[in-house]
Image (cartoon, grey):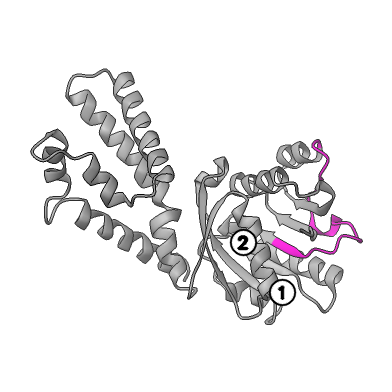
Amino acid sequence: MTHPNLLLIGCGKMGGALLSGWLADGWPKARVCIVEAYTPTRQAWADQGLTAVADPLEIPAGFVPGAVLIAVKPQGLATALPPVARRVAALCGAKPPLVISIVAGKPIAAFEEAFGVHTPVLRVMPNTPAAVGRGISGLYANPSVTKAQKALGQTLLGAVGQVVWLETEDQIHAVTALSGSGPAYVFHLVEAMAKGGVALGLSPEVAMTLARATVVGSGELMRQSADDAATLRVNVTSPGGTTAAALDVLMHPGSGFPELLPRALAEAARRSRELAG
């Protein structure tokens, strides 16, 4: 495949995970430029042979980006975006590059306002397992994004996990609630399982080891299996056995997972819309 120039704005945990994924997939270092204000992070990537600058004005004059990925914190976007947009306009002229945003809570309109109304923009909601190549991202493209640019977005986000395409921008809030915030739900499940093990007489260390390994192993089993989650659950549940006794509690109408988790996701989606203004 061809490798257009990539301009990465912000190289924190998620930006760094994406960059590591691109490099692991064979993206040439000479085709990447990083804008990162934090000196230790910037220097660490520069030491690996990448172009890393502190200010958009320092982006090399000959570096014309085919895609600009915005990975700054939401509270820093208002400060970071205008100088980036000005520098990108100076580098690209009348043909704007693909802009990819992983900034939580910021709509496509904010980037169209900064880069130009006809700028192709992808809005993305990734999640933290991207750090180990097991993430999943929901993507929504504005009408200016071409088929080739969609393929580029698929490649860039696919470097750190799976990709799903959304039909409307509003669905980003559902993705945020389900998979964006979802790792925290799983980690809390591990905490709760370990606490339950301690209540049954296990040491905290043994209980946590068992809980972590159970969740990690179950996730890997589900990843490798052709069966859906419901079938896998049934397969491990003997009628009248210990698992069935526990599931009677977890699936109890009105107080179990089938009611509790949708309520939690609805609250996360409500907060996502609220933060988006």
**58 within the magenta span:** yes
Residue bearing mark 1: 115
In the picture, measured across the screen, residue 6 lies left or right of residue 244, that is: right
> Residue 16's quadrant in the figure?
top right
Residue 188 drawn at (x, y percent): 33, 40
Which of the two discs, 1 and 2, labels the residue nearer the N terminus?
A: 1
In the picture, measured across the screen, residue 251 lies left or right of residue 151, that is: left
Instruction: Report, in whole angstroms, how far the alpha carbon at label 1 lies from the one at label 2.
Output: 22 Å
> Which one is in front, 55 or 231?
231
The amino acid type of the residue labelled 2 equals Gln
Mark 1 or 2, which is nearer the eye? 2
**199 within the magenta span:** no
Look at 61% across and 68% down and name the residue there: 122
154 to 22, vertically: above or below: below
72 to 148, vertically: above or below: above
Look at 59% across and 49% down and name the residue there: 160
Residue bearing mark 2: 154
Mark sitting on residue 189 = none
In the picture, measured across the screen, residue 160 lies left or right of residue 62, that is: left
> Which one is in front, 101 or 54?
101
Q: Residue furthest front?
A: 226
